[in-house]
Amino acid sequence: MALDYPLHIDTRGRTADVDFENHIKDLIEQVLFTSPGERVNRPEFGSGLMKLVFAPSSDELATATQFVTQGALQQWLGDLIDIEGVDVQAHESRIEVKVVYSIKRNNQRQIAVFSREVG
């Protein structure tokens, strides 16, 4: 068991925890939506995804965004998961990221979708 993200109290009044598969999903979310420089002791941690969203839209930018995002996930979580694909879509004030990955521990394929309001 691992601490749930974001940190919160469960119905028993204890710190909430999650199983391994959900912990991996939480780690992916942290990499995606943390900007480099945001963490004091790990200034390189994160993907920079949120900054790329504000650049002018083009096919080249979409490809670059997916490449950078997949690279960040591989760098920070490559020992836990194999990334099969990343799809990043911007919809007005919302960004949506679909990550297809396999957990190395059990070779279980997962698809996770994350979204955030931007701006």
Image: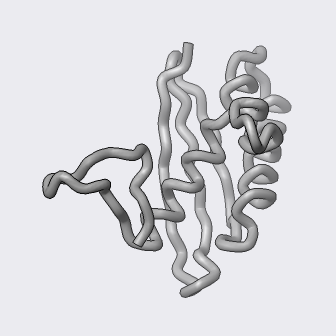
Q: Which residue lies furthest to the bottom in this view?
A: 106
Q: Where is residue 74 in the image (x, y as percent from the top left)?
A: 77, 60
Q: Position of residue 88 (x, y in %)?
A: 64, 40
Colouring rule applied to residues = one colour
Q: Where is residue 34 in the image (x, y as percent from the top left)?
A: 65, 36
Asked where in the image residue 50 lies, by quadrant, the reply is top right
Measuring 64% from the left and 81% from the top, which residue is drawn there?
104
Q: Is residue 105 above or below residue 26?
A: below
Q: Position of residue 39 (x, y in %)?
A: 70, 36
Q: Is residue 49 above or below residue 69?
A: above
Measuring 43% from the left and 49% from the top, which residue is drawn there?
5
Measuring 54% from the left and 75% from the top, which residue is drawn there?
109
Measuring 26% from the left and 48% from the top, which residue is drawn there?
9
How many dots with numbers? 0
Q: In this view, does 118 lie above or below 83?
A: above
Could you say which is closer to the camera, residue 3 or residue 96?
3
Asked where in the image residue 119 lies, by quadrant, the reply is top right
Task: Give the quarter of the figure containing the N terminus.
Answer: bottom left
Asked where in the image residue 95 lies, by quadrant, the reply is top right
Q: In this view, does 32 lie above or below 119?
A: below
With 77 as the anchor, is 111 left or right in this view? Answer: left
